[in-house]
Image (tube, grey):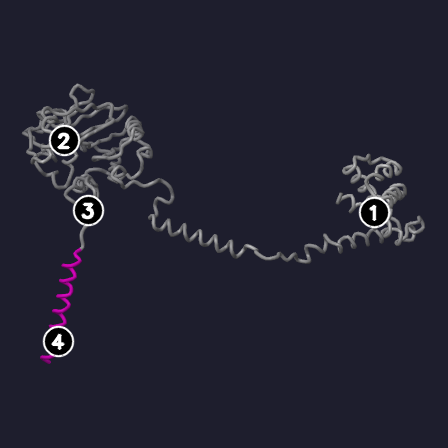
């Protein structure tokens, strides 16, 4: 019994040692995500602010499409925290969306391309240069507009941007420090757009420092039907459409599977050898069909009509090949044929055209047809001669 207990203890210690070594050698690490992401729990993410905002607003969602696809309607808010790659077209689309009755709040430490805001370097920042980037920032005193923040007290904040918004602009200054305006709001149509130069105040690691939260939270005091947090300009944009709801690996695998299926169907349906024509396709179009039609003509006594049809076709063929009028006489046809056909065939052509069978007005019995001078042997002979001339002219 004691040996069994020692075995169990040794096995347990071995397992624990194996797990400890595995965890120490292959320790899982969280992916290093870009800053300012609303779903990032890193110190440079903004998830803390977003989670608090979801308790105050009806709907807070991520926006991962281009700004030209912003939803229609009014009473909505778009929040963009340090967006990158904003084009002129994006700015125009956003302003058009705001004019319809929506709001936008932009956090950008170095805004460019926004004509309504003109920024400038704060006093002393240009002289300090890159040296200020290595210095530890200290909170400075802040002054808020009474219309923006009615609470009393002293407010401080750590400002890392060297730029300030010019106070002479058309916007309403919301808060500022001793070097200039840090946040400004402008009315655009039925909505408003706000520019804030302190995006770092929104990060998880700094939002509770100094008076950062007290200064930025009034920006979201209004109630909107929907609040959209822009992630498109953080590299997490998607394209609209039906395939956008599926992951890229699934779409790629489906496309490859579809191409393989099409190739398989093509190989299964493609004929590389000789094609066999079923007899049912030729029985009514080949010699058997011709024999059947001839038997009906013979049974009903239509030999003269059949010969008349052949002669008419021959005249049409002469008209197409030689330009001979369909009403030309046999002598005219023989004269035209002497330069083109051998003497025997020219004489045969003249004879076939000179002896047109009399046209019958209706069906006759075979006996009546024979009485009119059309025997089966003569019908076959004349049809053979007519066919030879027609075949010769068709090959000419």
Near mark 3 (Cα within 10 A), the count class, few <14, some 14-19 or many ≥20, is: few
Q: Nearer the viewer, mark 3 or mark 1?
A: 1
Could you give the CA–CA distance between mark 3 and mark 1, rounded to whole angstroms? 93 Å
- Dot in front, 4 or 3: 3
C-alpha separation, residue under disc 4 versus residue under disc 1: 111 Å
- Residue at disc 3, secondary structure: loop
C-alpha distance separating marks 2 and 4:
65 Å
Q: Earlier in the sequence, mark 3 or mark 2?
A: 3
Residue 18 picture quarter: bottom left
Name the residue located 79 percent from the left edge and 54 percent from the top edge.
291
Please tell me whether mark 2 or mark 1 is closer to you in this view: 1
Report if residue 360 is visible in the image: no
Which residue is tagged 4?
A: 7
Report the disc number at residue 32.
Answer: 3
Label 2 with label 1: CB-CB less than 8 Å: no
Q: Which residues are magenta?
A: 1-27
Closer to us: mark 2 or mark 4?
2
Mark 2–mark 1 Cα distance, whole angstroms, equals 103 Å
The kind of secondary structure element at disc 4 is helix
Crowd band around label 2 with a 10 angstrom C-alpha radius: few (<14), some (14–19), many (20+): some
Q: Choose between 338 and 393: the one closer to the eye.
A: 338
Determine the residue positioned at 44% across, 51% down: 259
Which residue is tagged 2?
Answer: 161
N-terminal of the pair, mark 2 or mark 4, is 4
Where is residue 91 shown, x and y percent of the image?
28, 29
- Between 284 and 145, the one lying in front of the other is 284
Give me the disc on residue 81. none
Q: Which residue is mark 1?
A: 386
């Amino acid at each position: 019994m004691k040996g069994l207990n020692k075995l169990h203890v040794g096995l347990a210690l071995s397992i624990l040692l194996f797990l400890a070594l595995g965890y120490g050698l292959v320790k899982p690490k969280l992916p290093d995500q870009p800053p300012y992401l609303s779903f990032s729990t890193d110190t440079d993410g903004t998830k803390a602010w977003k989670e608090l905002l979801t308790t105050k607003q009806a709907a807070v969602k991520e926006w991962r499409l281009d700004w030209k696809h912003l939803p229609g309607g009014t009473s909505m808010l778009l929040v963009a925290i340090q967006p990158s790659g904003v084009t002129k077209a994006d700015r125009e689309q956003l302003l058009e969306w705001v004019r319809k009755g929506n709001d936008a709040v932009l956090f950008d430490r170095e805004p460019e391309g926004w004509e309504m805001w003109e920024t400038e370097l704060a006093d002393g920042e240009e002289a300090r240069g890159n040296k200020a980037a290595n210095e530890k920032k200290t909170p400075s005193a802040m002054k808020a507009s009474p219309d923006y923040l009615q609470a009393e007290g002293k407010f401080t904040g750590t400002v890392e941007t060297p730029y300030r918004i010019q106070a002479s602009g058309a916007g309403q200054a919301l808060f500022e420090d001793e070097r200039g305006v840090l946040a400004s709001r402008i009315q655009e149509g039925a909505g408003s757009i706000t520019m804030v130069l302190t995006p770092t105040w929104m990060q998880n690691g700094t939002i509770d420092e100094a008076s950062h939260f007290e200064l930025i939270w009034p920006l979201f005091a209004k109630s909107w039907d929907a609040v959209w947090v822009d992630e498109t300009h953080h590299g997490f944009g998607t394209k609209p459409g039906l395939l956008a709801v599926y992951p890229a690996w699934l779409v790629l695998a489906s496309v490859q599977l579809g191409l393989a299926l099409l190739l398989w169907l093509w190989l299964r349906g493609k004929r590389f050898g000789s094609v066999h024509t079923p007899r049912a396709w030729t029985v009514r179009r080949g010699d058997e069909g011709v024999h059947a039609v001839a038997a009906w003509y013979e049974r009903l006594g239509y030999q003269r009509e059949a010969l008349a049809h052949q002669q008419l076709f021959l005249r049409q063929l002469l008209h197409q090949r030689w330009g001979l009028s369909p009403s030309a006489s046999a002598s005219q046809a023989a004269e035209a044929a002497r330069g083109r056909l051998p003497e025997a065939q020219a004489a045969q052509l003249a004879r076939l055209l000179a002896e047109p069978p009399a046209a019958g007005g209706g069906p006759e019995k075979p006996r009546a047809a024979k009485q009119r001078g059309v025997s089966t042997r003569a019908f076959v002979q004349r049809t053979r001669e007519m066919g030879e001339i027609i075949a010769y002219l068709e090959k000419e």
